[in-house]
Image (cartoon, grey):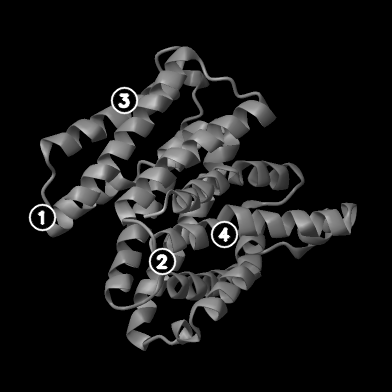
């Protein structure tokens, strides 16, 4: 494995971590959550479509039996994005990213109850450390409980749950022979169609009218950098490295990027305990991902 390929999942994580900038800008300019998602996914069809055309046109072919899993993936993507967007506007970007990165824990728990998959003591330790790190990041030990945005935290947890179910459903679809690009393409087609009646197009026109060229460029960047390109890069990385290595690099770089963006752009300065919680959670999740790749 060439070390230059390690940059692929790292870039994907940084791009995922930048999504809070786009979400906050759009919501501050009067774009509601469903309209925001329509913009993200409808525009994302183009780069995903391009990726398929450049990879293999046969990826467009699917069996009707694949549709239920695609629909589950679509529902999970909508739920993930709604919860994650809400979390990013309610709590710090770094906390929202860490709560999302807890998805592997939910995967382990769901797999334990549904498929009787073993949870080792080392995995339990990693899970406990990651959760304790999140508790530190919420500032529950440093502030009045009434000041903690509970809805933002619950939204972050919900995002992680939707992400976990998506990972399991997409893995099942991949085992049936479908490519990640195929799953994404048909999922976002379903999502875009479902969001059309819920989209406020007047909000879009009002926003674009502020500065058409600049805003359209911003919308393209939002869709490309917060959704399409990270998925493409993380998928490409699997051609050059183990999925566990890719997962470790992505899970470590996304929250770190969110922390830096929150610090530089929104002056979200973490306290000492918050930073310790951040580091503890990331180390625990990276160790958990590593164990998963070995197991």
Q: Nearer the viewer, mark 4 or mark 2?
A: 4
Residue at x-position 37% and y-position 87%: 64
Q: Earlier in the sequence, mark 4 or mark 2?
A: 2
Question: Marks 2 and 3, how far apart in space?
Answer: 30 Å
Q: Earlier in the sequence, mark 2 or mark 3?
A: 2
Residue at x-position 49% and y-position 53%: 8
Q: Earlier in the sequence, mark 4 or mark 3?
A: 3
Numbered disc 4: secondary structure: helix
Residue at the disc numbered 3: 132
Question: Marks 1 and 2, how far apart in space?
Answer: 23 Å
- Tell me residue 125's x, y (percent): 19, 31
Question: Marks 1 and 4, how far apart in space?
Answer: 35 Å
Residue at the disc numbered 2: 73
Q: Name the image quarter holding residue 119.
A: top left
Q: Are marks 1 and 3 in contact (CB under 8 Å)?
A: no
Q: Residues within 10 Å of mark 4 (few under 14, many from 20)?
A: many
Q: Nearer the viewer, residue 225 or 76?
A: 225
Numbered tag placed on residue 229 in the rendering: 4
Q: Nearer the viewer, residue 246 or 61?
A: 246
Numbered disc 3: secondary structure: helix
- Tell me residue 4's x, y (percent): 48, 51
Residue at the disc numbered 1: 116
Work out whether residue 6 can be spotted.
Answer: yes
204 relative position to 102: left or right: right
Q: Residues within 10 Å of mark 1 (few under 14, many from 20)?
A: few
Question: Marks 4 and 3, how far apart in space?
Answer: 32 Å
Q: Nearer the viewer, mark 4 or mark 3?
A: 4
Question: Marks 4 and 2, how far apart in space?
Answer: 18 Å
Image quarter (top left, top right, bottom left or bottom right) of the N terminus: bottom left
Q: Earlier in the sequence, mark 1 or mark 4?
A: 1
């Amino acid at each position: 494995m060439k070390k230059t390929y390690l940059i692929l999942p790292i870039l994907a994580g940084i791009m995922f971590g930048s999504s809070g900038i786009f979400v906050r800008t759009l919501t501050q300019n009067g774009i509601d959550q469903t309209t925001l998602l329509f913009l993200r996914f409808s525009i994302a069809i183009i780069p995903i479509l391009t990726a398929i055309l450049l990879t293999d046109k046969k990826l467009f072919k699917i069996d009707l039996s694949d549709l239920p899993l695609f629909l589950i993936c679509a529902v999970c993507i909508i739920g993930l994005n709604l919860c994650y967007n809400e979390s990013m506007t309610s709590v710090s970007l770094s906390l929202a990213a860490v709560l999302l990165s807890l998805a592997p824990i939910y995967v382990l728990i769901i797999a334990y109850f549904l498929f009787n998959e073993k949870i080792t003591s080392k995995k339990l330790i990693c899970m406990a450390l990651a959760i304790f790190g999140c508790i530190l990041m919420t500032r529950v030990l440093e502030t009045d409980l009434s000041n903690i945005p509970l809805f933002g935290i619950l939204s972050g947890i919900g995002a992680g749950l939707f992400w976990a179910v998506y990972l399991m459903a997409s893995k099942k679809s991949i085992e049936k022979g479908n490519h990640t690009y195929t799953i994404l393409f048909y999922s976002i087609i379903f999502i875009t169609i479902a969001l059309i009646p819920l989209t406020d197009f007047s909000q879009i026109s009002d926003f674009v009218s502020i500065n058409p060229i600049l805003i359209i460029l911003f919308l393209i960047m939002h869709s490309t950098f917060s959704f399409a390109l990270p998925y493409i890069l993380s998928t490409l990385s699997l051609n050059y490295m183990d999925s566990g290595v890719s997962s470790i690099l992505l899970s470590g770089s996304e929250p770190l990027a969110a922390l830096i963006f929150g610090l530089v752009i929104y002056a979200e300065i973490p306290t000492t305990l918050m930073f310790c919680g951040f580091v503890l959670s990331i180390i625990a999740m990276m160790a958990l991902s590593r164990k998963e790749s070995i197991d």
